[in-house]
Image (spheres, helix red, strand yellow):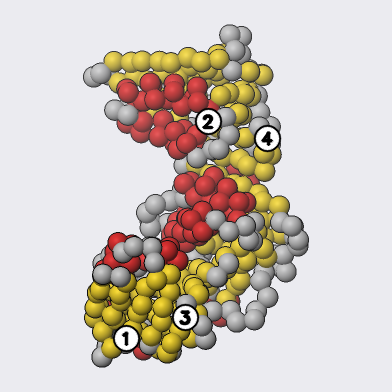
Amino acid sequence: MQFTCNQDTFSKYLNIVSRVVSSKPGLPILNNVQFESSKGKLIITATDLEIGLNTWIGADVKSEGKITVPAKQLTEFVNSVPSEVIDVILDNQNFNISSTGNFASLNTMPADDFPEVASVGDQKALLKISKDSLIKAVNRVAFAAATDDIKPVLTGILLEVSGESISFVGTDGLRLSRQIVKLESNAEKDINILVPVKALLELAHIATEIGEESDIELFLIEDRNQVLFRYGDLDLVSRLIDGQFPEYRQIIPTGYKTLAKISKSEFLNSLKITNIIAKSVLGNKLILDIDSKDKSITLSATQTDLGSNKSTFKGSIEGDSVKIAFSSRLLSDVLNHLDSEDIIFECSETVKPGVFKIEEDPDFVHLVMPMML
């Protein structure tokens, strides 16, 4: 194997691919990235057995080959050398890499032992979604998924594909986010799949880093229970989660008794003040008091050993006054993940979920379960 490529391109894609390399893998070879030089392109592959990445970058291939190289040390070396041409040659199983005044020789492991990352060949994509729509949906939904494996289905994001739309849904049992995205053309078929949140976060990161204005294609690899997302010259492959996602539609309220249009920044500032006490309360409990007469929203918290505090700001309020308790952490999470200043909060009763919406986007909804007053 021998090839030459530009440092900036090599570095950019090595950084992306190396993110899926496990820091403490069960198999030593999973510390490595795989290189295959073939037909004028360099194919770089990494996997942690749950997520796999394949990318193709342009290179001047002088001789073809396939080998695996330690990801961490190679990435650090390539990131450190000047932005110029890099030469690579495989010599007696040593991966020799050089640029002007810099040289490294890394030990390798045979590619025969590297786990295969699935591909789709000439299979037709199930759907295409714009880069910006996917990033927005993942940012608004992924944080609501569970972070532990007590209920594995809750560590995934439900993708509901139906005609010209795809819904992203995440929940951990205490909150739920849903973002509906309109597709430019109909999907090949309607499906429901459960994708690990880690895979979608990685895909959103890749789309943000590469920044190309191309659509993201979704393929199903049904015989392996996997999904493949293609963005430009990069494929991300992930296993799908087996299991039944909770039936969530029935808990999304269809009406409200109280509606408040509020400024996100004012709400966050009041949360920051109230949280000085609330963070010491069991469950980070605070009280949200909406006064329809005064058109005011007051957040307050009380901790017996510390004391109490409150913060009030104004809003446009319709309907009844209401007092309801929430976890300050859950409120902070949703507000920090919304990319709009104009927020709508709706509720009906103190024992029913509070609903957050974005004024200019009717396709987003977030529910937060209340606490006992």
Question: Mark 2, mark 3: which one is toward the viewer?
Answer: 3
| Rendered position, 62 above or below 334 | below
Left/right of residue 252 with respect to residue 36 in the rendered view:
right
| Rendered position, 197 above or below 340 | below
The residue where tag 3 is placed is 60
- Labels 2 and 3: the sequence-earlier one: 3
Q: Residues within 10 Å of mark 3 (few under 14, many from 20)?
A: some
Q: Whole-percent x and y of residue 361?
A: 67, 39
Residue at the spot 63% in from the left edge and 61% down from the top edge: 214
The residue where tag 2 is placed is 351
Q: Whole-percent x and y of residue 194?
A: 54, 62
| Rendered position, 79 above or below 273 | below
How far apart, in angstroms, are the residues tagged by discs 4 and 1?
Answer: 56 Å
Q: Are marks 3 and 1 in contact (CB under 8 Å)?
A: no
How far apart, in angstroms, are the residues tagged by discs 1 and 2?
Answer: 66 Å
How far apart, in angstroms, are the residues tagged by discs 3 and 1?
Answer: 15 Å
Dot 3 lies on which element? Answer: strand
Total number of numbered discs in the rendering = 4
Q: Whole-percent x and y of residue 357?
A: 61, 35
Q: Which mark is residue 360?
A: 4
Q: Which mark is residue 90?
A: 1
Question: Mark 2, mark 4: which one is toward the viewer?
Answer: 4
